[in-house]
Image (cartoon, rainbow, N blue to C red):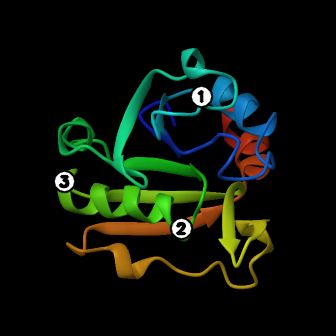
Amino acid sequence: MEDSILLVTHACEGYDRGMLEGRMEEAVKMFPGETIHISDGERPPYGGEDIYNHVFEDEWQGMPYKEDLEKLTGHQNFYRAGAQYNNCCGNTDLGISVFADGGKLTYLTDLTIWEKDGSYNLLEERPHNARREGIDMKNNLSIDYTEWRTLSSEKVLSV
């Protein structure tokens, strides 16, 4: 996992109604690889920017600037989290497909928010984890789902 990146989109108040507060900071601090926060430029992420290796500001609703996405080229393992899966996170993923040569995206379902009609839920509470194949513009993404609590107990904490 040390060659992996934890890529978090908009982990801050206003996108998740406080649901990720506490648990996101813990996950970022425990993650053995590189950590990146995609920021809206207005709200600080839970735990502050200093707990991340890098902070990329988004150009529009979770879509980082092309220059930042190109910095991800060559990386293949991305653990994904944040808010909101069906909006801003999807724009980040689209950018990875188009500008960063794709890779494997593993969504941490207990650290990702799904919003629908003003109702906020963890992605793990979605019955079938609405699949993401529609954002795979270059057919270069592999998308999977797991829970942080499972991953941290099996892999991260034993590193």
Disc 2 target residue? 144
Q: Earlier in the sequence, mark 3 or mark 1?
A: 1
User: Front-most of 77 and 121?
Assistant: 121
Q: Distance between the Cα atoms at labels 3 and 1?
A: 25 Å
Residue at image x 61%, y 30%? 31
Binning the other alpha carbons within 10 Å of mark 1 as few (below 14), some (14 to 19) or many (20 upward) gives some
Kindly identify which residue carries mark 1: 44
Looking at the image, is 114 positioned above or below residue 156? below
| In the rendered image, the vertical position of residue 8 relative to residue 31, given as above or below | below
Amino acid under disc 1: Pro
Mark-to-mark CA distance, 3 and 2: 20 Å
- Residue 89, horizontal then vertical, whole percent: 49, 59
> Which residue occupies 72% across, 48% down?
148
For badge 3, the amino acid type reads Phe
Query: Which comes before the other along the chain, label 2 or label 1?
Result: 1
Q: Identity of the amino acid at label 2?
A: Asp
Which mark is in front, 3 or 2? 3
Question: Horizontal placement of 67 versus 6: left or right?
Answer: left
Q: Are marks 2 and 1 in contact (CB under 8 Å)?
A: no
Closest to the camera, between mark 3 and mark 1, is 1
Q: Nearer the viewer, residue 117 or 3?
A: 117
Mark 2 secondary-structure assignment: strand
Q: How many marks?
A: 3
Label disc, if present, on residue 99 of the rendered structure? 3
